Amino acid sequence: MIGWLYHYIRATENMADLLVYFKRPNSWQQTINIYYWDTSPSSESISWPGVAMTDEGNDWYSYRFSGVDKATLIFNDGQGKQTRDLQREEDGWYFNNKWYDRNPETPITPLVVHFKRPTSWQQTVNIYYWNASPSSESVSWPGVAMTAEDNDWYRYDFSEVDTANIIFNDGSSRQTDNLRRNREGWFFNNSWYDQNPQRPDIPVITVMPKGATYQESQHITLISSNPDDAIYYTTDGTTPTIESNLYQQPILIETNTTLRCIGRNALGEMGAIFEFIYTIDPNADFRKPTITASEDSGNYQEAISPRFTITDPRETPIIAYYTNDGTEPTTHSNIYVQGNAINGLTGPKMILDTTTNVRFLIIDGAGNETYADFYYSVGSQVEEGDFRAETIYFLITTRFYDGDPSNNFFCRDRIKFNAAGEAEDPHWRGDFKGLIQKLDYIKDLGFTAIWITPPIENRSGLDYHGYHGYDWTKIDPRLESPDATYQDLINEAHARGIKIIQDVVVNHSCQYGIRGKVWIDHLPIKYFVPQGSQQGQVNYGPYQGNLGNYQSEFKEDNDNPVAPDWFKERQTSDAEGVVPLVDPLTGETVPKEGYNPNRFFGIDANNLDPEWYHQDGFMAGGDWENVSIQTKHLAGDTIDLATRRDNVKDYLINAICRYLDMGVDALRIDTVKHVERNNLLEYINAWKTHKPGLFVFGENLVKGTGWGDLFGDDNAPSFLRPWWYTRLGDDPKDPNSGEDSGFSVLDFSLFSTFRDNVSRGSFSGIGAILANDWVYGDATTLVTFLQNHDVGPDNDFRFRFQGNTEWAAATYNLLWTIRGIPCLYFGEEIEFMKGKPQDIIGNDDTLDETGRAYYGPHLEDDTIQTTQSHPLYQHIKRLNLIRSCIPALQKGTMSQVNEWGNAMSFVREDQASNSYVAVGLTIGSEQQITINNVKNGIYCDAVTGKKIDVNNNTLSFLVRANSAGIYVLNGEGKIGEDGVYLT
């Protein structure tokens, strides 16, 4: 299938870093510098003797070039000793006047490589190698035969080699590109992997339908982790073995049955035994009582007096228990009403003059239980306040929780198929109804604001995330339900004291144009016929016959009313895509096998409407780090808007003002650096004028510290960097040339250090970032994070955090206590999809293999307790509680920042609230923390409750490994309960 490139490009906005190491000779001074010039792709240089390298221990020193993959350099000690001129274009170790691809002082681990034979290759696979190290082994072409393993995998073991250049080939005409490898790896689909990407999982068995009570017989489908797993089962309660029944088709259950099963994967590995109990009772009664309210949940200015009516389809009496303090009702709670409810049973009025959460538990005579919640925000609405007091929970709405399966939708690209060849896990799965149902989950976790991905109507082959806008004036119907609109979500969130942050795209639209405003030339997709196929033969999940929108009557999702007449005529006709259509651009007739895919899925960048779009083509190569980024198109489905034109401004500004009127509390702006700063501020200031006090922040993605022209360590100019957008000045080398712009950004500068510190159990380098807080307009408004939907702190910034759990906990301690507004990406609270790529990487990846997998299974009634008992869930919940109680942690300035690898300390003070706190953090080991020049007085640790009386301006305390000391001056005591990581 055709792929859409947006995510690939977003994930590679910056070049790979170059990392070099140098071994200090005994006669050299202790300080080692690196002097460099002639770097690529950017042309950087520094004055002699260069910059100091980082001491790695054992006389090794390191230096990381950010955004540079090639450099000429000299190592020197600043006192007359230096190397010759050197060049390097890949990571390396320089030792005894020679470059190495690995540390030459570490023992050799012989290299082992594996290769997956493509089906078109010959059966014999060879490996040709040269430039090996530490020995200089090589072989003549075509190399040596590899050893065949199972499933078309081949293996080769080197002897005295740990690094080599490699070409895999079949001895005839087929071969890979030139490759290089320095650790064991599996080469599959033109990519290296550190583990076998096709290695089967340990079998985990799931069933459909689940074990429960049913009125009639059931056909039970067993599903295992891998499509080729063997499943063995018993139905008499005995332990299954490989001698038991082999599952081959759905199992008929007609009587009470205990079904036990076990899986075995292709490697012969056995999974655990799973048990499912089925009760078949024709007289079972599953009809639950229902409850309605005379006043719907929502916002009310004056006191209200709702009454609640229970209805049950049987004569037996019901009992309705309730609470109005937010706690979960039980059979020990107050009784609201009881009796026969077959004709409706209405209870007394409740007088509500403050914001109240009324919760019911209703039990009927058959034991069926109904839980229901009603939320009433009475009086003043959610206070705008100071957004620094909030903490943010970020989620991709479509991947969070599915409350209404009827609005689910499969995108054209990246459909997941199960073992039976059926499409599953629709891209558009979560929705507003599901999010409303799980607002209490987020509230229980302690978050006060939810950032949702753009909810406006989208179009593209992979638009589930919301960043391919088609109509900014409408909410995408795949998110809404009749009883769960966007307004309902806002109201329900506000009723719980939760704010809504709407994600907004200013920079680009989808490749369809903007509904009712501008058309981008395309042929209807239903007329596309892939090479080697013919019209009507598409068989791709729900896409049958052709690739037109399967939910549209005429298989056309491009309903733009400003399309030309020839296109509009096909919007409401010819669903099969068989009536000949002449392409007005070429004169050729479609459908036609293999006809130019770009006419269906791409755009002509040279013939866009200049009233709405830039005309500068697509981004490539060095465009990512120069002004071209602000007028070129990101990809074929993200078309760069002419954001300076008044018609574009009027459209986007007015559209978003409508959502602010609905109650949206804050905005997050996507792809900030793609729009020139002063131009972007026109939009932001218009929205802030419309809604005074509005908090707006944005994403200026950088993989590096991102200081631009300030400190000589960046390969891009200041005007593309995050700090520039938070200031109003025009001097790229002087942030103080302008005041605070009133716009904040996600803290990518801090995040970019996490790959090399917290992911390895250290705080090293964080102090240096915080020392440059003065660069920003107001660093206390920065939105801090460990990971999000685009990036993670591991490898090349593309993977969910995969470090030790305690290191993640220590990182949250950091983010919740330093300046800034902490933001958590959904699932971090349970290490969801740990170590997985944040987005699709391989050509055949589907969302379930990424950090954007569907989160719903962790939020079901039978799993949510496990989710909420996860140590990190409890840890973050307590951090939210602590931060909410200490104004200095929300808004205070930072001072006396000290960082020494395994620990750091600082002071935060908010004079307006007279809040003062001294903080010590550890990672990896227990540390004694001493902070000088603090105010005298009695300090109380919010973590342990320990009190210390300071009378000499010095505070000293012990902090356990991966924990925190949060000593509040005149603090009231311990906040929250001990957990695994805060004790």
Image (tube, rainbow, N blue to C red):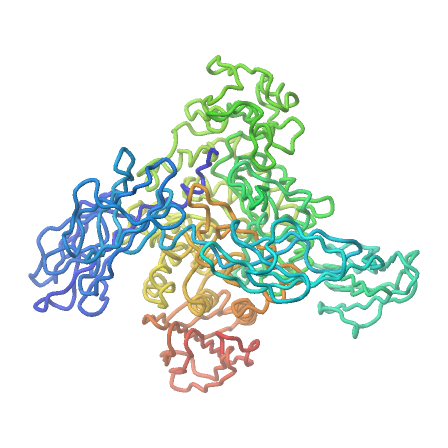
> Does residue 316 lie above or below 532 as drawn?
below
> Does residue 907 lie above or below 574 as drawn?
below
* Position of residue 523 in the picture relative to residue 221 (left or right): left
Please state the horizontal and vertical placement of residue 775, each as a whole percent of the image: 36, 56
Give me the residue at 55% from left, 26% from top.
Answer: 525
> Does residue 321 lie above or below 417 as drawn?
below
Furthest toward the top, the residue is: 587
Where residue 844 sits, quadrant-wise, is top left
Please state the horizontal and vertical placement of residue 804, each as a whole percent of the image: 42, 67
Where residue 240 sits, quadrant-wise, is bottom right
Where residue 141 sits, quadrant-wise, is top left
Furthest toward the front, the residue is: 243
Instruction: Count the labels in the image.
Output: 0
Please state the horizontal and vertical placement of residue 929, each as a whole percent of the image: 37, 79
Q: Would you say residue 610 is visible in this rendering?
A: no
Give me the residue at 42% from left, 36% from top.
Answer: 634
* Position of residue 754 in the picture relative to residue 329 (left or right): left
Q: Nearer the viewer, residue 925 or 244?
A: 244
Give me the residue at 18% from left, 65% from top.
Answer: 105
> Does residue 291 lie above or below 485 as drawn?
below
Q: Nearer the viewer, residue 872 or 230?
A: 230
Please state the horizontal and vertical placement of residue 382, each as a whole percent of the image: 65, 58
Q: Nearer the viewer, residue 440 or 405?
A: 405
Q: Would you say residue 209 is visible in this rendering?
A: yes
